[in-house]
Image: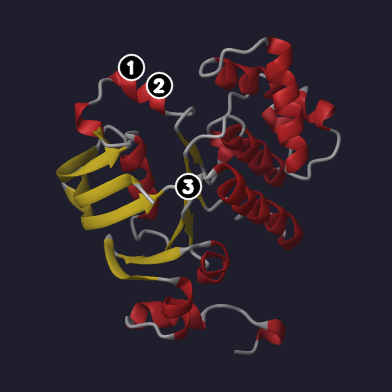
């Protein structure tokens, strides 16, 4: 398989404070890469750096990010905009922050789709409806006519996931995609991700603090702590024979039935 993303020796700082240090990862077509670690380990910063959306205080001190054989350093704003949504999309942890509160869901969905896909508004609406149904959301027509504040956190999360998946991008960056969802709905989302990988060859980077979810969904796992990679490998190897003490602590935190390990 071909590598569609390569991150080489990436070091990132916020206001001069180091956040990521010497990160090296790659992603193949049709692969799910799980990144685990506690809050503050640099997982979200890594996703933002890959997408080229670091805040103004964020600086790539050194290293390179290559998407589809192109260095993002060499892409202009228009080229980056064309990549986002169509070829690479992101699912944020708190979708309500990124949705326009004064526009109904269907309007925002249609704008996203028609910016990247040459289809009619009615075709876009049908694509929205079918994608929302895949998220196990009831009454998609009502949801499409709703404003973000009229939906629960879990519903917003699923709508945002649907928005990211609708254009079938080659890469989806998912930042804690199931954090606001109950177990049964989380299973639906995870299964939909795995289905996209298997049927469309979609690649995912799934960020989570739960190594149990990563072990279930990922082809490879990366463990991060304090902005550095401390362990990397296949899920079975990482979970059954962890090398780093921090990884052992994460595995020890996985709750089992009855709260017993």
| Dot 3 or dot 2, earlier in sequence | 2
- Residue 37 visible in rendering: no
Q: Which class describes the residues within 10 Å of circle 2: few (<14), some (14-19), or many (20+)?
A: few
Image height of 157 relative to 119, above or below: below
- At 20% from the left and 50% from the top, the residue drawn is 8
- At 64% from the left and 43% from the top, the residue drawn is 157
Instruction: Say how many tags the image has.
Output: 3
Residue situated furthest left in the rendering: 62
Q: Tell me the element at label 3.
A: strand
- At 56% from the left and 62% from the top, the residue drawn is 217
Determine which quarter of the picture holds residue 24. bottom left
Residue situated furthest top in the rendering: 120
Label 3 – label 2 distance at C-alpha: 18 Å
Residue situated furthest right in the rendering: 139
**Badge number at residue 82:** 2
Task: Between residue 202 and residue 89, name the one nearer to us.
Answer: 202
| Dot 3 or dot 1, earlier in sequence | 1
Q: Which class describes the residues within 10 Å of circle 1: few (<14), some (14-19), or many (20+)?
A: few
Task: Between residue 257 and residue 192, name the one nearer to us.
Answer: 192
Would residue 221 appear left or right of 110 to someone viewing this image?
Answer: left
For marks 3 and 1, give the one nearer the viewer: 3
**Badge number at residue 78:** 1
Q: Which residue is mark 3?
A: 203
Contact check, label 2 and label 1, Cβ < 8 Å: yes
Image height of 254 relative to 202, above or below: below
Q: Tell me the element at label 1.
A: helix
Residue 16 horizontal/vertical position (percent): 16, 46
Q: Tell me the element at label 2.
A: helix
Label 2 – label 1 distance at C-alpha: 6 Å
């Amino acid at each position: 398989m071909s590598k569609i993303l390569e991150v080489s020796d990436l070091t990132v700082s916020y206001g001069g404070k180091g956040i990521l240090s010497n990160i090296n990862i790659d992603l193949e077509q049709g692969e799910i890469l799980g990144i685990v670690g506690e809050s503050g380990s640099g997982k979200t910063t890594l996703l933002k750096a890959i997408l080229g959306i670091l805040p103004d205080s964020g600086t790539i001190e050194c290293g390179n990010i290559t998407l589809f054989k192109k260095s993002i350093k060499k892409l202009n704003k228009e080229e980056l905009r064309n990549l986002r949504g169509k070829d690479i999309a992101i699912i944020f942890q708190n979708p309500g922050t990124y949705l326009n509160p004064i526009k109904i869901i269907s309007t925002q969905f249609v704008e996203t789709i028609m910016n990247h896909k040459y289809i009619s508004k009615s075709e876009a609406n049908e694509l929205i409806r079918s994608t929302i149904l895949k998220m196990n959301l009831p009454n998609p027509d009502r949801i499409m006519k709703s404003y973000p504040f009229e939906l629960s956190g879990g519903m917003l999360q699923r709508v945002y996931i649907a928005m990211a998946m609708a254009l079938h991008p080659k890469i989806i960056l998912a930042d804690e995609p199931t954090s606001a969802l109950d177990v049964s709905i989380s299973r639906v989302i995870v299964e939909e991700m795995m289905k996209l990988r298997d049927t469309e060859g979609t690649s995912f980077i799934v960020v989570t603090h739960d190594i149990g979810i990563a072990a279930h969904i990922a082809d490879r796992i990366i463990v991060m702590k304090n902005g550095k990679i401390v362990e990397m490998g296949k899920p079975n190897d990482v979970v059954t024979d962890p090398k780093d003490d921090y990884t052992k602590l994460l595995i020890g935190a996985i709750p089992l039935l009855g709260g017993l390990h």
